[in-house]
Image (spheres, rainbow, N blue to C red):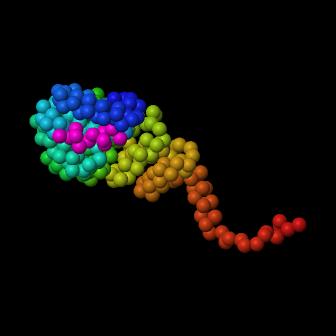
Amino acid sequence: MRKWNVLLRDEQTTTCFDRNFRDFFRGADPHSRCVILKALTTEGGLLEKYETFVVEYMQQDIPLLSPEDIESILNVVLKMKRREEIESVMDIVGTRLLPLLPQCKRSTLIRTLQCCGAFQINDSELIQRVLATLEDQCVGQHSHGVNLNAAQLFTLLNAIEKLNISSEKSAEQLVIFSFMSIRRQLGVLSIQQVAEAARLAVSLEMGFTVYISDIVTKLLEFRDTNKNPQVAEAVVAVCSVYRVEAPQPMVINKLRKQKIRTEPRRTGPRSDNLR
């Protein structure tokens, strides 16, 4: 399947592949179909080609799947295009996940929130239960030593931002946990990641706490922040919201641009260039 685009070079091969794929998919067990779906997402266009076909089987399989396989389904959902089918699959996923939440890995819970945020799935019961379970796993009484990697932290924060739920208790605790975790990882984050953390801090209306201060300070320590538009935008935002001083090169660059805009345009040659 990783070479499907090589195989499908002529009509005869395409017809043969299509028939064999459909027959094999129909005959596979639910877990094997999850593996096939994962392979579908590795090649652009292949999932879209078979999306309508596989959704019917996804809907049948989801009530039988383990939390690990559900996470594979969620990864597929993120690549799907058709809104109606996405909503249908997520509805069944929610029904299946609710009784399994205590058994779910943090990655599965975060992926669930990501899907809800990406497609604005307003399943309040699922979202609240996932948040509560994740809060218990990350900041609960028995959560000592729990770590999320940078990708998971940013995915979680972006999902909370898109769902507009940062003021809810469980979400608020997870946001604080996430920024504190990002602070501990500042030494290995790229300038783009630090800028994204700063942008999220502004968007989620975080106070200028010690951990937010450290993120902002780290961002302002980078050189050439004005060369990347997204980074520059984050710098401007944190300087405005948190009343901190912009890096000197950015100030100079801004003044230079203002000067260029305000200088009158000359229509004739400069007198000092005349010979």
Q: Position of residue 163 (x, y in %)?
A: 26, 51
Picture layout, residue 255 above or below residue 62: below
Q: Quadrant of the C terminus?
A: bottom right
Query: Is residue 83 shown left or right of residue 179?
Result: left
Quadrant containing the N terminus is top left
Query: Which one is nearer the viewer's eye here, 100 or 46?
Result: 46
In this orientation, which residue lies closer to the viewer: 85 or 265? Answer: 85
Find the residue positioned furthest to the front.
12
16 and 122: which is toward the camera: 16
Which of 275/211 is in front?
A: 275
Residue 32 location in percent, x, y? 22, 26
**26 is higher (above) or lower (below) than 266:** above
Region rendered in magenta: 45-56
Queried whether the magenta region covers residue 47, the answer comes back as: yes
**Residue 33 shows up from this direction:** no
Residue 70 percent location from the top left of the image: 20, 34
Q: Residue at x 48, y 41 (%)?
A: 191
Q: Quadrant of residue 71?
A: top left
Can residue 80 be spotted in the picture?
A: yes
Q: Main secondary structure of the magenta part?
A: helix
